[in-house]
Amino acid sequence: MRADHHPPHFPGSVLLLAAWLFTLPLTAGVFEFAGDEFGTRIITHPMGYHGKGGVLTVTVGISPASPHAGEMEIPIRNAINTWNELLPTTGNIINPADNIPDGHYDFESIALHELGHCLGLGHPNLASESGLLQNDKDYTASTKGTNNQFDLNSGPDGVIGSRDDLRGDDVNLHWFYKGSNNPFVLPSIIDKTTYSQNLAELPVNDQYAANGDRDVAALFGLPETEAVMQQGIGAREARRSLAADDVATLRLAMSGLDELAGTDDDYTLRLQYAGLTDNADIVFAFDNQAAFAACQINARYIEFNTAHLEIQSGQISFNTGFSWYFNQSLATDSPRLPEVSLSANGMQTPVLLTQGEHLTLAVSLNPYASGGSPADYWVKASTPMGDFWLNDQFQFVASPAPLSAYGGPLVNIAAFPVFDDSTAGLPPGTYIISFAVDDNINGIYDATYEQSITFTINP
């Protein structure tokens, strides 16, 4: 990908052209405009966000006069639905995709990427705007630091963009998960309390922020996985679903100006397809204004906050000089309902234990399009000793009445342990653990979405 920065075209505004180069095989965690010119700690928000919370609707259209206007409709609707769901996936690289002819580029995959740019997401890697060549562009996004050159060393593992890279005084631009520096998992809360650009907050022994590159994913045991916002795509390759890093970056922006989830300035993004029109917030066109494909955006500071920008408009341009494949299978437009799950020692089936064995119980939640909606969270343990509930201190306490563990927005929980200890202190018998979330916050155990798991302890 290439990002070309230009001087402000009117006071308080910045303009950027973000293009996707296709020459390299194909990570997010970085916002557009972050860098030397406008500052390293920039968070860019979609058009219409002025610092107040609520549902933020951004319209997406197709220029009626554009070549391929009709063929673009279904892939763009699919890309809109993918960003609306904000579902982190693994194994999202299909290469080669059987239905894409030789020499053709998947329009839907590239439209998904360019939409990310027009929503404020930048490249998580140095990319072609760095001026670097070949694989060096896959190092985590940064500025050059005081020595005015990129310091590039892939570290002992030899994988570019991973946690042991040695980067000298390069100033990191990538927001990483402080708990693990793993760009393929999500914590339950995504805001400045869990994500940082400050390398001093990396886990012990990590040297640099890891990005969502496919080779980095392999180090975490996730083959064929890469963030959509990683630069570059090859012919016949499809990448039509998001990785955790894509989701985390947009959710970080959605935590608002205070960068704290659960406060009044949070927003929920909803993309809306506006049809064949030039009067949408973001407009697609094959207008040959890009060498391959590009999102051109302009933005301005939100009030006097120089760390937060609001995009003013977006134009996504494609070049007709390539062979394009237009997927014509429409994904469902119906939002998927939240899914809750439980695991015992990593399994979601009944588990048999001997007293004294170690037990890890973990809850998971995928809110899909309901992310950010208010909810009560409940974890119940039906035991030989009676009913126990996980309280707001994350401790199981005996109670005949339901106790809520948390009340707040629905967020993605990859795997949160609610019990991680020996079973030596638990009496033999059968235990049923239930995890539930409601579709409201009222302190009443509605259990709108619920799942249970059973484990048995033998003497």
Image (tube, grey):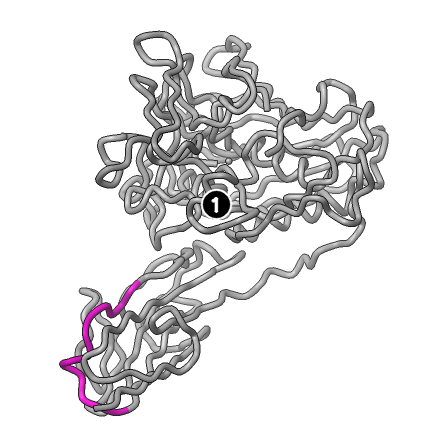
- Above or below — where is 422 with respect to 114? below
The reply, left or right, for residue 376 in relation to residue 250 is left
Q: Position of residue 193 (x, y in %)?
A: 27, 43
Q: In the image, which residues are magenta?
A: 417-429
The reply, left or right, for residue 61 in relation to residue 184 is right
Q: Position of residue 74 (x, y in %)?
A: 77, 47
The residue indicated by pointer 1 is 218
Which residue is more in the foreground, 174 or 358?
A: 358
- Please tell me which residue is depicted at 72% across the width and 18% down the height of the picture: 291
Q: Position of residue 111 (x, y in %)?
A: 67, 37
Residue 398 among magenta residues: no
| Residue 419 visible at all | yes
The reply, left or right, for residue 383 in relation to residue 253 is left
| Image quarter of the C terminus | bottom left
Q: Secondary structure at mark 1?
A: helix
Q: What's under tag 1, amino acid-wise? A: Ala
Graded by Cα atoms within 10 Å as few (under 14), some (14 to 19) or many (20 or more), the crowding at tag 1 reads some
Q: Position of residue 128 (x, y in %)?
A: 56, 19
| Image quarter of the N terminus | top right
- Please tell me which residue is depicted at 51% across the width and 23% down the height of the picture: 137
Q: Residue furthest left?
A: 425
